[in-house]
Image (cartoon, rainbow, N blue to C red):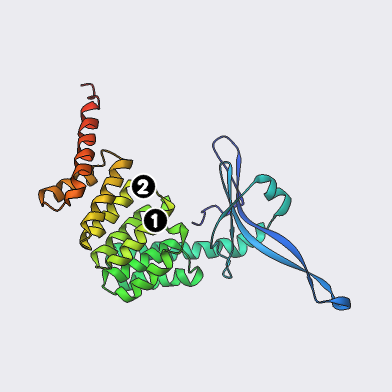
Amino acid sequence: MADKNPNSSQHDSNGKSDVRGVFSTQEIRRVGTGTTTRKTVQKTFWFIEQNGKEIDCQPLNTNYIPSGPKRKITMDELIAKFSPEPEFYLNSVFPKMQEMQRNVDNGDTHREKGENFAAEFEYSRALKIDEENVRANFGIGLTYLERGDNAKAQDIFQRLVKLEATFEPEHKHLFNEFGINLRKSKMLQESLDYYKRALELSPNDENLYMNIARVLLELKDISQCVDFLLKALELAPRHETSLKFLAWLIQKQLVPADKLDGVRTALKTAQNGAAAKPKAAG
């Protein structure tokens, strides 16, 4: 999250400058009534980050960390409404961002070594700075699941499903690991709710449908399990994991009679697609 170079602009290979740093906006408010009316100026700080043509604007929390939902703004808006705050960024915001990044990185290192209590300590330090940090929430949630503390994991689950940033591509690896661990910990309803929340934000991800099918199998809802596998194959007809899953259900004679035609059609479509794919030149 933090940048090694604490400048408020960066240059790409074409020499163009991307904006990155803290900016402020001011809002004039009237306080009181009648003769006691007076004007007050409220200053709000924002973390601004430009990636190509897109500019993200994110508020700072009380610990001077970018936190909460991001919104898109235009360069015209940035120039017209925002004032750069380079000293505040360098002296207050950037050091806090670095501190939090170190805590999260240390937590990840401890967790990868199986040192769950040390990992929990580091993630907790990060969450004191920003309770909405997605990586820290995932990390501490995984440590709870790995040591079987499902009650604490449930609290983290409730927090993560409310954060849209949970399901952004940059968090995909942790997102998948958390969902798998929910299922393995037999927190099946939580796992189902978690994947369905992801589906609201990424309705065309065949892997999500397949993951939901796995949970439904454990919940012994075979009919819906097949429906979700067929949806995955509708989006990606040759999705290997879904095809193997369906083949296993057929082998175990678990496919409901009213779903057999749909399953046969999906398998035939996959076979035809495989046959139609040209062989690579040798």
Quarter the C terminus occupies: top left
Determine contact: label 2, label 1, CB under 8 Å.
yes
> Could you tell me which residue is drawn at 26 percent across and 42 percent down?
239
Total residue callouts:
2
SS for tag 1?
A: helix
248 sits to left or right of 262 = left
x and y percentages locating residue 42 in the rendered image: 72, 67
x and y percentages locating residue 279 in the rendered image: 22, 24
> Could you tell me which residue is drawn at 23 percent across and 46 percent down?
242
Does residue 231 appear in this view?
A: yes
Residue with the mark numbered 1? 198
Above or below, 152 against 15 in this view is below
Amino acid beneath label 2? Asp
x and y percentages locating residue 115 in the rendered image: 29, 69
x and y percentages locating residue 108 in the rendered image: 36, 62
Ranked by sequence position, the earlier of labels 2 and 1 is 1
SS for tag 2?
A: loop
Residue with the mark numbered 2? 205
Amino acid beneath label 1? Ala
